[in-house]
Amino acid sequence: MTTQAEQLLGARVTGADGKLVGTIEQVFRDDVDGTPAWARVRSGKIGRFVPLGSCQVTSEGVRVPFDAQKIMGGPNIDAGQHMSAAQAEELTRYYGLTIPTQQPRSQMAESQLSEQDWLVRQEERIQVGVETMETGRVRLHKYVDVESVEQPVHLFHEEYEVERVPITGDERFSSDLAEGEREIILHEERAVLRKELVPVERVRLRPKRVEEDTTIRDEVRRERIEIEPDQAFADARRADTGPGR
C-alpha cells in the first residue's frame, strides 16, 4: 500500500458487507518500513482498529475486507501516538493475520518467515445483538348483545261495582216515569318503557413492557493445533540408534 497516511485521515471506511463503518481518525505506520499499517476508525463514540495492508482506496474512501461487526467487535486498544509491538500482535491475532517473528530489526529482513511457515488458529466468538420484531396483534371489537331483563312495577286499574241503597219513606223523588242513565269513567295504569343510552366505562389497548432475563445457547467452533510427529521417521531413527549401533 503506497498511499500516504495523511491522505487516509478523515476517509470513510466501508466494510466487506458494504456497510459504512466510520471515518479514519488516526493512522499508525509499520515500525519496519514506515508504511501505513493500522487505522483507528471512529463510529460515534467508539474507536476500533482495522488493518490497512489489504484495503482498497477508492474515490469514496477506503474499503476493507472485514465487515463492520468484525471491526467494531475488535479489541479496545489505547495506542496513543504510537502502537506497541504487543498491541499490534493482539490486533494481528484478532484479524487472523500473519504474526511476524520476534527478532531484532536488523535480522528480520534476513530471516523473515513466509506465510506458508505459519498455521493460523481461529475460533468463532458469539456477539449478541437485540432486535425488535412483531410478535402478534390484539384488537378491540365492540359487539351489541341482546339480553332479557325483568323489572317489577306496581300498577292499578279501576273496575266497577253496583251499589244499591234502599230508599226510605222520608225521601222524595219525581213521580214521573222516565228513562235515564249515568256514566262513570274507569282508569288503569300501564307500564311505559323508555330506554336511554348510558356510558359505563372506557376500554382501550396499550402495550405493556415486560422486562425479562433470558439465556441464548449456540455452538462455536474453535480450531486446535497439535504436534503430530512423523511416525515412520521416528521409527527409522530409533532403529538407527538401537543396540549395537
Image: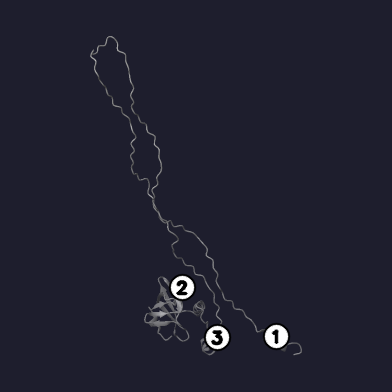
Q: Is residue 223 above or below residue 208?
A: below
**Mark 1 vs 3: CB contact within 8 A:** no
| Residue 200: mark in rendering | none
Tell me the quadrant of the picture where the C terminus can be found. bottom right
Tag 1 secondary structure = helix
First of labels 1, 3 by sequence position: 3
Q: Residue 58: horizontal and vertical position, in percent?
A: 39, 82
Q: Is residue 53 above or below residue 170?
A: below
Q: Residue at x 39, y 81 (%)?
A: 8
Q: Is residue 63 above or below residue 197?
A: below
Disc 2 target residue? 69
Disc 1 target residue? 235
Callout 1 amino acid: Asp
Cα–Cα gap, marks 2 and 1: 50 Å
Tell me the quadrant of the picture where the N terminus can be found. bottom left
Q: Is residue 150 above or below residue 172?
A: below
Disc 3 target residue? 116
Q: How is the image coloured?
A: one colour
Instruction: Pick whichever, 165 or 233, lies toward us.
Output: 165
Q: Residue 103: horizontal and vertical position, in percent?
A: 54, 85
Cα–Cα gap, marks 1 and 3: 27 Å
Classify mark 2: residues with Cα within 10 Å, few (<14), some (14-19) or many (20+).
few
Quadrant of the image occupied by residue 57:
bottom left
Q: Residue at x 40, y 80 (%)?
A: 62
